[in-house]
C-alpha cells in the first residue's frame, strides 16, 4: 500500500476514534496506519497505548507497541 493510502486511512481512523473514543479497535487501527510513517511514530504509540488501556486483556495493542 502506498504512503498516501496510509495517510488517508489514518485520517479516517482519527475520525472514528474521536467519534467513539471508548472503542479500542479504532485506536488500534489508527496506530497501525500511523506506524507506517516515521514522522507519526509518536502518535502511533499513543494510539496503541490508548487501545491497550481500553482493552487490557487483548494482547494485540501490546504486540503492536513492541513492533514500533
Image (cartoon, rainbow, N blue to C red):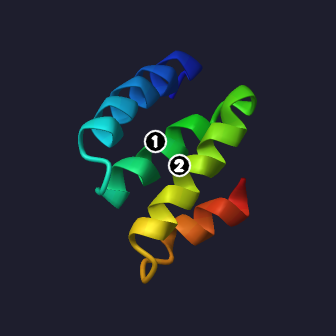
The residue that appears at 70% across and 39% down in the rendered structure is 41
Q: Relative to the observer, which residue lies in front, 50 or 38?
A: 50
56 relative to 3 in the view: left or right: left
Residue most extreme to the top: 4
- Answer yes or no: do the residues labelled 2 and 1 have beta carbons within 8 Å? yes
- Horizontal side, residue 33 vs residue 45: left or right: left
Which marked residue is nearer to the observer: mark 2 or mark 1?
2
Residue at image coords 50%, 77%: 59
36 or 55: which is nearer to us? Answer: 55
Seen in the picture, residue 45 relative to 30 is either above or below; the reply is below
**SS at badge 2:** helix
Residue at horizontal 46%, vertical 41%? 30
The picture places residue 65, in percent across and down from the top left corner, at: 65, 61
Q: Is disc 1 surrounded by few (<14), some (14 to 19) or many (20+) residues within 10 Å?
A: many
Q: CA distance from mark 2 to mark 1?
A: 6 Å
Q: Could you say whether the residue bearing mark 1 is in a helix, strand or loop? A: helix
**Residue at 52 percent of width and 16 percent of height:** 4
Outermost residue toward the left in this view: 19
Where is residue 7 drawn, in percent x and y? 50, 22
* Label located before the other in sequence (2 or 1): 1
Tell me the number on the disc at residue 47: 2
Residue where numbered disc 1 is placed = 30
Amino acid at each position: 500500500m502506498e504512503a498516501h493510502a496510509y495517510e488517508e486511512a489514518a485520517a479516517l481512523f482519527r475520525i472514528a476514534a474521536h467519534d467513539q473514543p471508548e472503542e479500542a479497535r479504532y485506536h488500534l487501527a489508527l496506530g497501525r496506519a500511523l506506524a507506517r510513517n516515521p514522522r507519526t511514530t509518536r502518535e502511533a504509540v499513543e494510539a496503541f497505548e490508548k487501545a491497550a488501556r481500553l482493552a487490557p486483556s487483548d494482547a494485540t495493542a501490546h504486540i503492536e507497541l513492541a513492533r514500533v
